[in-house]
Image (tube, rainbow, N blue to C red):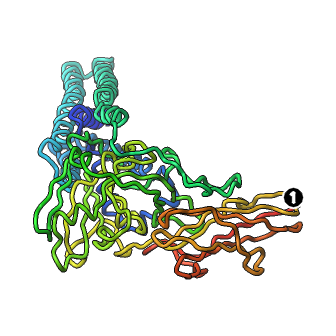
Amino acid sequence: MVAGTAGLATSYFVAMVMTIRESPVVAVAELVIRLTPGAVVERAIRVLGHHDKTFLVIVLLVILGLLFAWAGRLARRSWWKPLTVFAAIAGLGLVAIAAQYDPRLTDVLPILVGFVTWVVCLSVLTDALRSEERRAARAEAADPDDPGESRRPARRGFLLGAGLMAVASVGVAALGRVLGQGRRHVEETRRLLRLPGVSEPDAPAGVSVGLEGVSPWRTPNDSFYLIHTALIPPAIEPKDWQLRIHGMVDREVVLTYADLMARETTEAWVTLNCVSNPVGGLLIGNAWWSGVRTADLLREAGVHDGADAVLQTSDDGWTCGTPLAALTDDRDAMLAIAMNGQALPIDHGFPVRTLVPGLYGYVSACKWVVDWEVSRFEDISAYWTQRGWGELGPVKMSSRIDVPRREDEFDAGEKRVGGVAWAQHTGISAVEVSLDGGAWQTTELGNAETIDSWVQWSTTLTIEEGDHVLRVRATDNTGLVQTGAEADVLPDGATGWHEVHFNAV
């Protein structure tokens, strides 16, 4: 186990020093995520929340510890059997690296260093034990009647060597973390960027209904929900970023970050919500996004007749199939470079991500985007759709009660209630509430100047003492009323009316 830990430490050190995004353990963890059925992933997210990836890494480390212990047991009787265990572990790491998008030969170096470390360290430690056993055996042969210490193999040398090796492993891993400043440098670059054409967010007048507890119109960057499959988000220098547009186009286009900066910037308020968001859930946020329209870029590439999809690929290998029509119509679909007036946070896709109003992120919101292949849905396979999720991913109209909260208790009488509603790229025309199954009552809406952002709503109800249930539903600008039929998030988003149980005294 000491030898195994030393190998993990040296592989992590090499990965950090070479600014390789993934250590071998992380690469294997991401491979597990890729191979896990969508329903199981969804369940894990529900149960573990933001700790799901941490839990997966811990499980992998425990499994590795058991395998290392087994290799040590095998080393008692054979020199080559533990090598097969180490080789199998290293082979799994190589498979995980090969499964990444466009891996380089340098990406496998941490695995090779870790394997050599395993072999050398195990050999050093077992040789120390064997030499002591041979010495004790010679002493017994020389004087069989001597029951003294000379007949028992000494462990002090082994324990000292193992202790030093364990301390060195911790030091190597810590040094790698210190030296691995790639992400830190990218973060500093991001902070110092000056983005032409990007303005500070200025919320439209009247968007707030003025009710404390209702989600603010603009979601701060550090409060915006995070959903992605990367254990370690890619840290990409702007000068190293480029997007390749190819496939069913007249001409291949390669864009650099400088090319984007030189183009006209479009800005818009856009609400994003995850397809995994349950009815009344919090996986939603509204922000001021800045970027370059995707329609202009695809027009320059010259899309062929018959194409209906764009397969987007992230720097970490994640893919999504996006309807071509949503990238080329009049909506503010963009390659986003800024969020709320600042360069994108690394976790939200810096330096460039794709943003498509009206579509769930699993078919559109490609963070760290580096490749667009114009194609047809029948010819592509994307990360989530091949796991059973819907192909087109249009956002479903929904509404949420923010005030009161579930199980709240307050004085009977007049009570102001409120929340938010959304129907991206369609817009909300009305929100109604029903108390204890009674008639639907209209509410006051905040002013939403864009159909791509959510709207706040509020109203005042007269509430008697006792337990109550409040429900909410919305109507979009086409007159469609939000359905009360309950459906799970799989395969293409949850439906149903949000309800809150509370008590008045």
* Foreground residue among 95 and 304: 304
- The quadrant of the picture occupied by the C terminus is bottom right
Q: Residue at x 20, y 39 (%)?
A: 110
* Foreground residue among 317 and 170: 317
- The quadrant of the picture occupied by the N terminus is top left
Q: How many marks?
A: 1
Please identify the quarter of the rendering in which residue 187 is found: top left
Task: Please name the residue that numbered disc 1 is placed on.
Answer: 411
Q: Residue at x 17, y 56 (%)?
A: 244
**Is 382 situated above or below 179?**
below
One can see residue 180 in this view: yes
Question: Could you tell me residue 309's position as x and y percent?
Answer: 25, 72
Question: Could you tell me residue 207's position as x and y percent?
Answer: 60, 57
- Left or right of 30 in this view: 220: right
- What's the amino acid at mark 1? Asp
Q: Residue at x 65, y 66 (%)?
A: 445
Please identify the quarter of the rendering in which residue 359 is found: bottom left
Q: Residue at x 45, y 67 (%)?
A: 275
> Dot 1: what SS?
loop
One can see residue 44 in this view: no
Question: Could you tell me residue 144's position as x and y percent?
Answer: 24, 23
Mark 1: few, some, or many residues within 10 Å (few <14, many ≥20)? few
